[in-house]
Amino acid sequence: MTGSKFVYVTFIRASAEKIFDALTKPEFTQKYWAGTRQESGWCVGSPWKAFAPNGRMVDDGEIVEIDRPNKLVFTWRNRLFADMEKEGFSRCTYLLEPSGSCTKLTLTHEIDVSPSKVIEGVSQGWPMVLASLKSFLETGAPLEESTKWPEGI
Amino acid sequence: MTGSSFIYVTYIRSPQQKVWDALTQPEFQKLYWFGGHQESTWKKGAEWKMFMPQHGLTDSGEILESDPPNRVVIKWRNEFRPNLKEEGYARCVMELAQEADLTKLTITHTIDKENSQFIQAVSGGWPRILSSLKTYLETDSAHGDTRSAAEQTHK
């Protein structure tokens, strides 16, 4: 098999519904995900777009599968950096499963390119985003470092 | 390169020394590590042992490097599941770094064996343990299902 993949599992003391909303709705993502927001009709085939705080589109793709609040699969192309954009569409999956007092969130981000700049990049980014999501949902406060769009980008 | 590895990075809103203490002191470990605890002086060359309430000794090894509160390297072998024990010693590196009000914690668990069942097992355990550690340090209460080994089988 060729390709690159990043998998990350975290357990969050919140319901799957709350986590699903926090991953997809602008009023939540803007709080912990570098000020970004996503736009989509959230149906199979709907376009999916992510925007930086200044309104610039930074990623785009399409919803492949949606089963709220258990699973979301969408394609994801980086539009910010030429070397990542030319790798084409990656595929991102959120899987949410109940686990005792928590919800288990499994993130899988993969692409049919090896080695991949996209997967190298998201491997650096996801741990902070998901750590901040967890803090945001469990304490009401995201991690400060994750709230601002990086300077100079 | 041959071998298997598991790498996990998380960010915890807590001082580095507190994260170090929570990782190395039994009274804290028991609160978020499936009820288990570890015994070691955490000095280079010291013995290292892990105990779980329902199994007794589950893992043992030796401290290979120690630089509190920044880094520790543990030679680590499972002792209670024959298929894991026969894979021999793995190496676990815990690295901590203060970044503003956060501690970045990186766990790298490796073994010189392809398709390692031991690495597969710890890949299931670490996200639970580290999620609960983060919750414990940020909210003062660990996840219910990692507080007591009786509620959650140690896999």
Image (cartoon, helix red, strand yellow):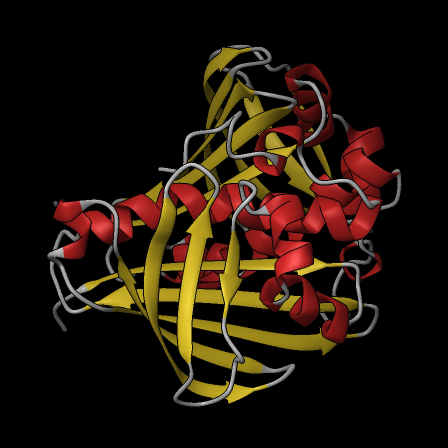
The residue lying toward the viewer, choosing from A112 and A55, is A112
In the image, is B88 to the left or to the right of B125?
left
Identify the residue shown where x is 30% and y is 44%. Answer: B121
Identify the residue shown where x is 52% and y is 48%. Answer: B36
Q: Position of residue A88 (x, y in %)?
A: 37, 46
The residue lying toward the viewer, choosing from A12 and B151, is B151
Identify the residue shown where x is 82% and y is 74%. Answer: B100
In the image, is B40 to the left or to the right of B78?
right
The residue lying toward the viewer, choosing from B118 and A128, is B118
Where does the C terminus of chain A fall, quadrant-wise? bottom right
Q: Relative to A45, does residue B155 appear above or below in the rendering?
A: below
Kindly give the residue lying farthest to the right in the view shown: A140
The image quarter containing residue B147 is top right
The image quarter containing residue B85 is bottom left
Q: Position of residue B73 (x, y in %)?
A: 42, 79
The image quarter containing residue A103 is top right
